Image (cartoon, coloured by chain):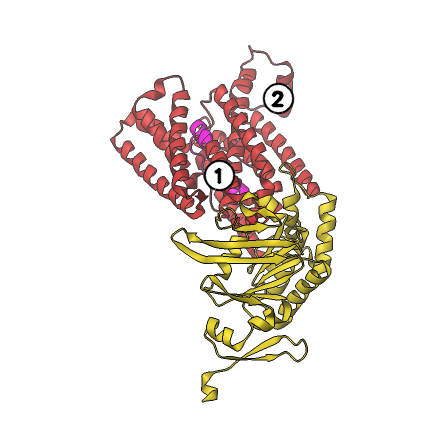
Amino acid sequence: MRRTLLFSLLFLFVLLGLSVIAALCIGEIRFTPAELWQLMREGSEEDVRFNILMQLRIPRIVLGFVAGGALSLSGVILQGIFRNPLVEPYTLGISGGASVGVTLAILLGWHTLHGGIALSLAGFLGALITILMVYSLGIRHGRVQIQTLLLTGVMISFISSSLMMLMMSVSKTENLHGIVFWIMGSLSDNNPSLIVLLAVATLLAFGLSYLHSPSLNAMRLGSERAMQLGVNTGRVIKLLFVLSSLLTGICVSIVGVIGFVGLIVPQLMRSLIGTDNRLLLPSAFLGGGIFLIVSDIVARTIISPNELPIGVITGIIGGTVFILVMGKRKKE
Amino acid sequence: MRDEIILSSLTCGYSPKHQTLHNISFRVTKGEFVAIIGPNGAGKTTLFRALTGMLPLQPGMLSIKDTDSTQLNPKERARRLAIVNQQVEGDQLSIEDYVLMGRLPYHASWQLFENQEDYTIAEECMKLTGIYEKRHKWMNRLSGGEQQLAAIARALAQQTDILLLDEPTSHLDISHQMRILNLVRWLNRERKLTVLLIIHDLNLASEFSHHLLMLKDGTIFTEGSPAEVITEANIRAVYDADVIVRQNPISGKPCIFPYSQETTR
């Protein structure tokens, strides 16, 4: 068990290193690895190439890694507590709530205030309200009703997408572009302090949830069976639900809606290394980060000098890989 | 004799207005083999759920090994009482990983991996139940009988003094029924485990247990030794079924033979 963990982590770290180097080199201005090495060692502020590296590419890679890791981690956690591999962070209506918040903020003209921070704040408030609603509706008599939680989330997603359409249909054309672009998600336009915030939140959430990975394993037998094995199921579900939805909320409000990561990466990892959450949590975390870094390389180079929304890429790459892997497994 | 489980006027159910069990009181002493019988809807499953901590109870209703059930957290409960369910779940989990889960109640909250002692105990439990050779097989690839053996091994890995089984044999063939129950009896005799067995089959209940608890409509209809409980009059009163009771020629325990009204006409 521990050896498998070590090997898969080693493999993923190598992959992460390679994708980071690729993401540093590839772009509108390309570097060879040798040039990159030279720039890193002796670059200076006057060098345009050095500034591209430091101020554009590196923050983007960091944001891609933490956002991908956060979304994938939330996916694994939610799939674990709901015992359903098709649940993803957005199934619970969190992205819907955040989108409504951001749309409202754009309509009110807040996006001109304080850079992107006001938008992120509005998105996070929207997500937070959704989480509170899903959570309070999903808990009856002090017990977590898992099916109700799930259904409430799906219903809130529908309601918020209708609200979005309502607001978009009455909004001005110049606002429409901002809304649409935000919904599709992007790793650009980033504020360094928001990146740091997301990174800290993600690492904290990872540490806390990893401590609960044995409980998540036991919950694969069902929440009653897990309780018979000494797991305080109610408390674990509440804690992990709040943790993963807050994480998703922060993530969505910073990078927008980047779909499929929380669904595809955990599923892919499950078919590669198995279903033990002690392996799955760290692997999905790293895998999600790698997936988003690579998707971002594609998104910003495929129609260069223009950029595609990263959500388009995660959907296409992720969905295709997913179907291929599933098809291969069926044959076996 | 020490009391392992004490139920005193246990009254509970799924909502405060509709209590399923009324005033159930009994004691299970150490080393006993108690079978709980009764028709469908008599409250066997509710009693099981009350014992496993799935139903809210008032203080004083249930005590497990000298501690009131309301004072026990899930971990402490799992170190006192091991449970084997009717349906065994474990999808793509190997038998070994499944049995190792029985060690969970002994892990500190920061302990993520099993230690050598856990592996030793799990191995011993798998050998005892005869599934050690298959330890790498997935739970969902096993037959119903093998799944039950794995569940018993997992329960043994919890190293409790009390074993509670809910209809472990109800969908097994006669050879697996006997294998499971003989194993449970061996654990009761040799390992001094206190056994509570919820079971439908009256003949198996009579054959294996020391003490029978017969439930009807959420209360104890009668209790006692198999010879006291398994009588034609009791079966008619509780199950509304016509049976004759004879002694098993080998074990001397009462044994029922159902008959149809038509044959006597």
- Residue interval drawn in magenta: A249-266
> Residue drawn at (72%, 50%), measured in percent from left and top?
B121
Residue B194 location in percent, x, y? 65, 58
Residue A168 location in percent, x, y? 29, 32
Report the predominant secondary structure element of the magenta stretch: helix
Mark 1: which secondary structure? helix
Q: Nearer the viewer, mark 1 or mark 2?
A: 1
- What colour denotes chain B? yellow
Decide which of B124, A311 is in the foreground and name it: B124
Decide which of B211, B81 is in the foreground and name it: B211
Crowding at label 2, few (<14), some or many (≥20) Cα neighbours within 10 Å?
some
- What colour denotes chain A? red
Of the numbered discs in the image, which one, if any, rests on residue A238?
1
Residue where numbered disc 2 is placed: A36
Pointer 1 indicates a residue of which chain? A
Q: Is residue B42 visible?
A: yes
Separation (CA) of disc 1 from disc 2: 46 Å
Which quadrant of the rendered structure holds the C terminus of chain A?
bottom right
- Answer whether residue B5 is magenta in the image: no
Looking at the picture, which amino acid does disc 2 mark?
Answer: Leu
Decide which of B225, A60 is in the foreground and name it: B225
Residue A19 shown left or right of residue A164 in the figure = right
Q: Is residue A36 above or below residue B19?
A: above
As drawn, the residue found furthest toward the bottom would be: B265
